Amino acid sequence: MATTLSINGKPRQVDVDQEKPLLWVLREDLNMVGTKFGCGMALCGCCTVHIDGRPTRSCITPISAVVGKQVTTIEHVATTPSGKKISDAWVELDVPQCGYCQAGQIMSASALLANTPKPTDAQIDQAMGGNICRCATYVRIRAAIKKAAGIEEGATA
Amino acid sequence: MSTVLDLDRRAFIRATLVGGAALAFEAKMAIAATPGAKPVMMNAHIRIGADNSFIIGAQNPEVGQGIKTMLPMLIAEELDVDWAQVKIEQTLSDGKLYTGQIAGGSFATPNHFLPMRRIGAAARQMLVKAAAARLGVPEDQLTTGSGKVTHAASKRTLTYAQLAPDAAKVAAPDLATVPLKTPAQYKIIGKSHMGVDTSDIVAGRPLFGIDVSFPGMLYAAVECCPAYGGTITSYDEAAVKALPGVVAVVPINTSYNPKGANDAVAIIANSWWVANKAREALKPVWNDAEARKNSSARFAENAAELYKQAPGADILRRGDVDKALAGAAKKVTADYDYPFIGHANLEPQNCTALYKDGKVEFWAPSQAPERGRALVAEMMGIAPEAITINMTRIGGGFGRRLMNDYMAMSGQIAKAMPGKHVKLLFNRQDDMRHEFFRPGGWHSFEAGLDKDGKLIALKDHFVSYGADGKPIQAAGMGAGEFPGPLLSDICYCVSYMKTNVPTGFLRAPTSNAMAFVFHSFLDEVALAAGKDLPEFMRSILGEPRLIPAVQGQYGEFHTGRALGVINKVCEMSGWKGREGDGKSGGGKGRGFGFYYSHRGYFAEVVDITVRPGGAVHVDKVWVAGDVGNQIINPINAVHQVQGSVIDGIGQTLLGQVVTFVDGAGNRTNFHDYPLPRITNAPSDIVVEFVLSDNPPSGLGEPALPPVIPAIANAVFAATGKRLRSLPIVPANLA
Ligand code: FES
Ligand code: FES
């Protein structure tokens, strides 16, 4: 049965099992591989996308649950105001090491900034706590979020 | 992964090969029929574009250590071009064209610092020669810069692109003697350069092994025998094949077992999600009775048994340690241990392969692709030359990908589907279980102090894994373990037990464990000597001097470089001796750790808080490191150190333990094998490098080990409790 999804503002048709997680539909059926697989159990945050603006783990989200909703992925997030600020800060501070987790980090950070333009350290930890970075780029992740939010280096909002 | 790019890259390499020469530099060849119309191949690393852009081949696997940026920086520096003119392409893995294509041992910096620069310098020299001939002036009147050769006197300038077709025909200079820039002339080295893939990563573009995609590609999931060493007895092929989307079910060998002994079943489908789910119907039966006898409980029993016996062998013995201990004014004894742990790369193991006409092409996220070639050739019985290896960006290495089991499996799977690209992917549980673990181990120490508190004797009985008097992979200990080479009465000895568990190298292998046991124990001995650890270290290190390497035993060690970083970190952190709440219950503590590994000297100080309930948080870390006279890419150097420190925090405090039950690892995902999260990261990690007059060395590993004893020592300072087992768990501090 064909399903129509709204991905990055465009309707996309796929003909797959309704239970197939959005992560694998993006990666296998739509050839959008920016969203990453890390754990498959909502434990690492690699697969984070926005669904109606909310950061969501696509590895445990069957496509049946996203019909009629707006999905935004890493490939498109820089077209949103907070996504643009976050992406720019990520590049400027050279946040990635291996880079594998960074799509998920950017999606979580963009969602944080969209709702909380000047996050406190505690709010940053809270919003980013579900995203693992095996290379442990956390010092720069914090700094980049603050930079994107216009919070001065070293200051705690 | 775009096919266009891929074809382009292969053309790059083929053109080189058409030249017919084997070694990197001799492989130069102009491929421009019309000068300027097509890029000119200067050598296997440099291609000059008609628009005076420079495509530099990055020859080593990129795992996040920044080598894809750094090696081309070295070439670009000596080629004398602007970084903005440079485009970087990952080369193929090809042992005939390139040397040292491996991400391991923090070797890339020391091994390639000169060779990469020489490649750039040689190409520059050829361009200058071509310019001299074209302009009819002596070479020494020409200067270079920004990809141009200038003759100042006649105000004439030629771009490298204009010169490339001629330059490529100039005889390549002797790489050993080609002149190099002095550090004062550096324009690229020593300045921060962003990762070459950073923008693509941030935009979510395909880069990693897992991202490789081809039209009509198939996907494979594998069910491996859980108990290491077991083999397949039977499985329900019909049930799996009946599932929609499944294409084939194939028995394979993971490469943990000898060739021919299949120990895994691959399910190949038109979707990985389908293939992975189909495993539920496989119902495998394993021949694993022998393997299942192994367990962590049994290893611990074996260790206790081995401690009742005389040690199996000496690692280092000098003087008469027993006599020295008998005469010591004070003795300190303690037993330490640490568990098996895993790598947990965030990108699960994967590999894509295409088998066609007896040849196989890989897209492999491997840290050691040439070893992968040898393994595949052996496992599949094909010639090494029939294997092509594309290197993808790698979502974390940490040593796991020095092993190439995924390449061996992927090759066998592709062979079952000739003409089709097949991507093999582990799920997280596969990745956690089918590992090459950092082996656990036990140490029993005895140290002797003289009446002035000077360390005069040290004995360590190490119990580890091995057979026939030899350690298995990554389970050994070096004779150079500090302070071995500095003491006159010393004995490190070892006993080995057998295990079925596959072991391997984990970032700063052996060092990550030895740092904890030796430098926690030294803190205990220092206390007995009435000193703090930095002061005690100074008393052991003595005068700055080089302790020469002893062939077959240990490499050289410079006490002055050690003192340099120890003094530096004390100054940075305002170290004032032992500081902490001790038994007061306040929960704050400060600790120090030093370690020398991978040619890098690192000293670290941590401030911690022991929270109510016993959880330890690292508040702030200071790091002083000596990796020679030149930090090549500062923005990345600092980041490698910060990542290493947090990695060490994870090993120390988060409960990382792999336990073996019935011959198999029992960890499955990040809930039972935790990795550091942002909440575990210190508020700051201050990094400074002590520049010493030594060639630059690597930074992927040596900053990790010292933080582990620093934390353990801080826990003692905070609580008065000496914890001698990793990981440090809240229950022991509550
Ligand atoms: S892959 Fe979805 S949270 Fe890890
Ligand atoms: S950059 Fe490697 S996992 Fe985050």
Image: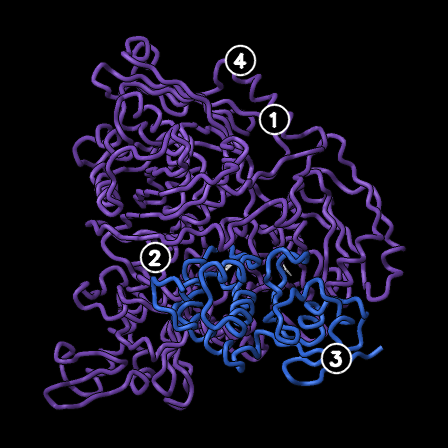
A61 displayed left or right of B331: right
Q: Mark 2 lies on which chain?
A: B
> Which badge, 1 or 2, comes first in the chain's sequence?
1
The residue identified by callout 3 is: A68
Q: Mark 3 lies on which chain?
A: A
The residue identified by callout 4 is: B308
**Disc 3 versus disc 1: distance between alpha carbons?**
55 Å
Q: Where is residue B498 in the image (x, y as percent from the top left)?
A: 60, 27
Is disc 2 on the same chain as disc 4? yes
Other-residue count near label 4 (Cα within 10 Å), few / some / many at <14 / 14–19 / ≥20: few
Other-residue count near label 3 (Cα within 10 Å), few / some / many at <14 / 14–19 / ≥20: few
Q: Mark 1 lies on which chain?
A: B
Can see residue B27?
no
Q: Which chain carries label 4?
A: B
Judged from the image, the quadrant occupied by ligand 1 is: bottom right
Q: Would you say the beta carbon of the disc 4 residue lies within 8 angstroms of ligand 2?
A: no
As drawn, the chain in blue is A
Q: Position of residue B355 (x, y in %)?
A: 68, 64
Residue B226 is drawn in which quadrant? top right
A68 displayed left or right of B637: right
**Disc 4 versus disc 2: distance between alpha carbons?**
46 Å
The residue identified by callout 1 is: B299
